[in-house]
Image (spheres, rainbow, N blue to C red):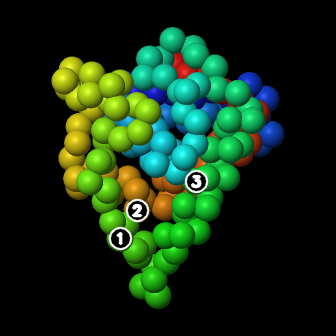
Amino acid sequence: MGMDLYSFHARTKRAKKGLSLNWTAWHYLLTLLDELDCDISEASMFNEGERISAPTCRVWAQALRAYIRGLGFAKTGRSRSVANTPARGLSGKNRAVNAFYLRQGIISRSDKGFSQFRTDQKLLIRIAYFFENCGGCRQY
């Protein structure tokens, strides 16, 4: 179970297939986007077909691409570690929503999981690619 995103007007075959993330990855993505000062008001923690508009998807993709460029690769091919923020998982305008899901046990505040998601460039590139080419999406 998790969040499946299905594109409206995909520009590529790969984006047409959609994107699937588990609940933890979806939460970490929203937290990262919030920290990057993106408007995540269209995002939902419910998979009932809520819409994310194409302009919002493009803004998210640009923010993720900029973040990925900041990570860079060392000569060994490994991604550099990223410092975790002290307010991880409970920051910004989603504080009440995140606190609710923490109490329900739907999401976790695992330091290891969050830092792994933030430094997993391959996953972030795949997510950014989807948002660039989806033409808007629905959440299921």
Q: Which of 111/88 is in front? A: 88
Residue 90, percent from left and from top: 31, 38
Spatial separation of the CA atoms under disc 1 and disc 3: 16 Å
Q: Is residue 120 above or below residue 109?
A: below
- Whether residue 1 sits left or right of residue 33 in the image: it is left
Q: Are marks 1 and 3 in contact (CB under 8 Å)?
A: no
In the rendered view, would you say 79 is above or below 100? below
Q: Of the residues under marks 3 and 2, which one precedes in the sequence? A: 3
The tag on residue 64 is: 3
Q: Residue at x 61, y 61 (%)?
A: 66
Secondary structure of the residue carrying tag 3 is helix
Amino acid type at circle 3 is Leu
Q: Secondary structure at mark 1?
A: loop
Residue 82, quarter of the rendered image = bottom left
- Crowding at mark 1 (Cα within 10 Å: few <14, some 14-19, many 20+): few
**What is the three-letter code of the residue carrying label 2?**
Thr
Q: Which mark is residue 102?
A: none
Asked whether residue 77 appears in the rendered view, the answer is yes
Look at label 1 and name its amino acid: Ser
Q: Residue at x 55, y 22 (%)?
A: 139
Callout 2–callout 1 Cβ contact below 8 Å? yes
Extreme residue in the top direction: 48
Q: Residues within 10 Å of mark 2 (few under 14, many from 20)?
A: some
- The mark nearer the N terminus, 2 or 1, is 1
Residue 49 location in percent, x, y?
57, 14
Q: Is residue 127 above or below residue 125?
A: above
Q: In the rendered image, which residue does mark 1 sit on?
A: 81
**Looking at the image, which residue is at 62% across and 44% down?**
60
Kindly give the residue lying farthest to the bottom in the view shown: 75
Can residue 22 be seen at all in this image of the molecule? no
- Mark 3 to mark 2 CA distance (whole Å): 12 Å
Q: Which residue is mark 2?
A: 119
